[in-house]
Amino acid sequence: MKNIINSVFSSGIFVILIGLTFSQCKSQKSESQGIMGKVTWLEGNQMPTIKSEKDSSSTSVNPKGTPVKRTLKIYPLTNLMDVKEQNGLFTSIAGEAIVSFESDETGSYSIELSPGKYSIFTVEEEGLFANSFDGEGNIQPIQIKKGEWLKKDIVINYKAYF
């Protein structure tokens, strides 16, 4: 028996058997796909300032914002031609949202999605917000690929000035 075990280990068959065993065990995340990230709020003056050593009492600007709980909506890929905008927010979007969900109190979110191209918006009091665009006028475009999770942090900054 000892000779059989030694020959299995020395021939590399053991390594192959272990590899096959673990390759059959996949996590739920690897078989699914979607988007995850963090939502933060940023407002006020974001201009860089020069502070003296005496002026250490003033608060510093957090360029990443403060984590917030928000409702998010995912639409099919949406172009600027398909929306109405007012005061930095989208007040009307052609078509219906595919899904609506919330980030938690720390701003974290994740949602499983089918592979495809989408636009993601946050729900604000006076409309929907998104602040990134591609070269074709698509609003906050995301592309979900089979078996992959896209990380997309969202900074809500329509009340900030730079």
Image (cartoon, rainbow, N blue to C red):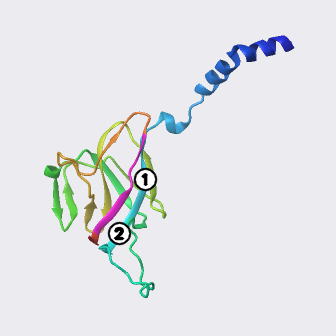
Q: What element does badge 2 sit on? A: strand
Q: Which residues are magenta?
A: 149-158
Q: Quick one: quadrant of the C terminus?
A: bottom left
Q: Amino acid at mark 1?
A: Gly
Q: Which residue, given by chain and number where applicable, does mark 1 sit on? A: 37
Q: Which residue, given by chain and number where applicable, does mark 2 sit on? A: 42
* Outermost residue, bottom side: 54
In the rendered image, residue 79, in percent from the top left (x then y), is placed at 18, 48
Identity of the residue drawn at 32% across and 72% down: 43
The answer to whether one can see residue 24 in this image is no
Q: Nearer the viewer, residue 158 or 119?
A: 158
The answer to whether one can see residue 160 in this image is yes
Name the image quarter holding residue 101: bottom left
29 left or right of 90 in image: right
* Outermost residue, right side: 1
Q: Nearer the viewer, residue 94 or 160?
A: 160
Q: Nearer the viewer, residue 101 or 145?
A: 145
C-alpha distance separating marks 2 and 1: 16 Å
Name the image quarter holding residue 46: bottom left
Identity of the residue drawn at 39% across and 67% down: 65
